[in-house]
Amino acid sequence: MTTIRRFCCNDLLGFASVNLDHLTETFNMSFYMTYLARWPDYFHVAEAPGHRIMGYIMGKVEGQGESWHGHVTAVTVAVEYRRQQLAKKLMHVLEDISDKIDKAYFVDLFVRASNTPAIKMYVKLGYVIYRRVLRYYSGEEDGLDMRKALSRDIEKKSIVPLKRPVTPDELEYD
């Protein structure tokens, strides 16, 4: 049986195997600690019996006004646990917190333009491609900024796609 629970400091010692996928961004330890300290509600793990980490999601809430949103910084599932809808369950946790607790207008995420399986999954979860970010990943590969409107965005303004691609320096960071 899978348990979805909040990420804790001890998990930093046991989740490295989840990051072995070449499409998964791996960050330094202080990056994970910052997210854990600043946005603990947005950091969860899927755990198998025996306390093995199957996957995790980390994110944050940011922005101002109608740009107030939840952001998925990383969601990944270990190869041996894929096709069990764990990513979907983890995404729903972050979306629910963004919607019901933080009253965000939308949730966004960035995904490599070449990561077709992930893009298809996000579309199934209700995300749309909001814009293409040229050379987002290491100055080489384009990223797609995908968004899902939440209940506060009644008119769905947050997901109206931009007509042109943007560069990383045009992104707004809060």
Image: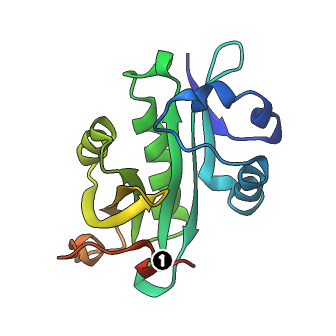
Residue under numbered circle 1: 68
Q: What element carries label 1?
A: loop
**Residue 150 in sight here:** no
Quick check: 64 above or below 111? Answer: below
Towards the viewer: 146 or 2: 146
Towards the viewer: 128 or 30: 30
Image position of 6 (left or right of 22):
right
Q: Quadrant of residue 133?
A: bottom left
Name the residue type under label 1: Trp
Q: Can you give x and y, in whole percent of width and height, for residue 74 in the image?
A: 53, 48
Q: Quadrant of residue 125?
A: top left
Quick check: 54 above or below 128? Answer: above
Q: In which quarter of the image is residue 41?
A: bottom right
Q: Can you give x and y, in whole percent of width and height, for residue 43 in the image?
A: 63, 48
Residue at 41% across, 81% down: 170
Towards the viewer: 75 or 139: 139
Towards the viewer: 72 or 16: 16
Instruction: Farthest residue to the front: give it.
Output: 140
